[in-house]
Image: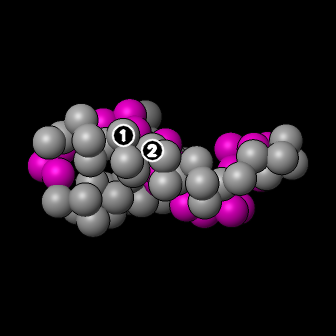
Amino acid sequence: MPFTPDAKKSLELSLRQALRLKQKHISDGHVLLGLLQDPGFLSARLLTEAGVDIPALRSDITHLLTTNAA
């Protein structure tokens, strides 16, 4: 079954997040960072509309990923 363009983009962004953090695998945290990176994704829009501070959430997730990797 082929991926949709948004699914492909989210996986690419997830990989970029893992590489940015110098990690050798893609975890659920990387996928979440990828989904939050593009404001056009439904996930990011819904969280923004709910009043979530996306940059702060991304910072918290990055901290957790780097702390758990250490």
Residue 1: image quadrant is top left
Q: Which residue is mark 2?
A: 61
| Residue at the (27%, 54%) spot, across then down | 18
Left or right, residue 44 beside residue 38: right
Q: SS of the residue at dot 2?
A: helix
Asked whether residue 32 is drawn in magenta, I would say yes
Residue 65 is drawn in which quadrant? top left
Residue 10 — which label?
none
Task: Characterize the magenta stretch by its predominant secondary structure.
Answer: helix
Looking at the picture, which amino acid does disc 2 mark? Ile
What's the residue at 58%, 48% (across, down)?
A: 57
Residue 11 in the image, given as x and y percentages of width and height: 40, 50
Identity of the amino acid at label 1?
Leu
Q: In the image, residue 69 lies at what x, y percent?
A: 18, 40
Mark 1 packing: few (<14 Cα in 10 Å), some, or many (20+)? Answer: few
Question: Could you say where residue 58 lies in the image, as x and y percent from the top left?
Answer: 52, 53
Residue drawn at x 60%, y 54% as measured from the top left: 56
Q: Where are the magenta residues, as a range?
A: 23-47
Image point (30%, 37%), residue name? 27
Q: Which mark is residue 64?
A: 1
| Secondary element at tag 1 | helix
Give 69 or 18, whichever is nearer the viewer: 69
Q: Badges 1 and 2: C-beta atoms under 8 Å apart?
A: yes
Residue 31 location, quadrant: top left
- The x and y percentages for residue 35 are 55, 50
Task: Check residue 69 for magenta coloring.
Answer: no
Residue in front for this viewpoint, 26 or 9: 26
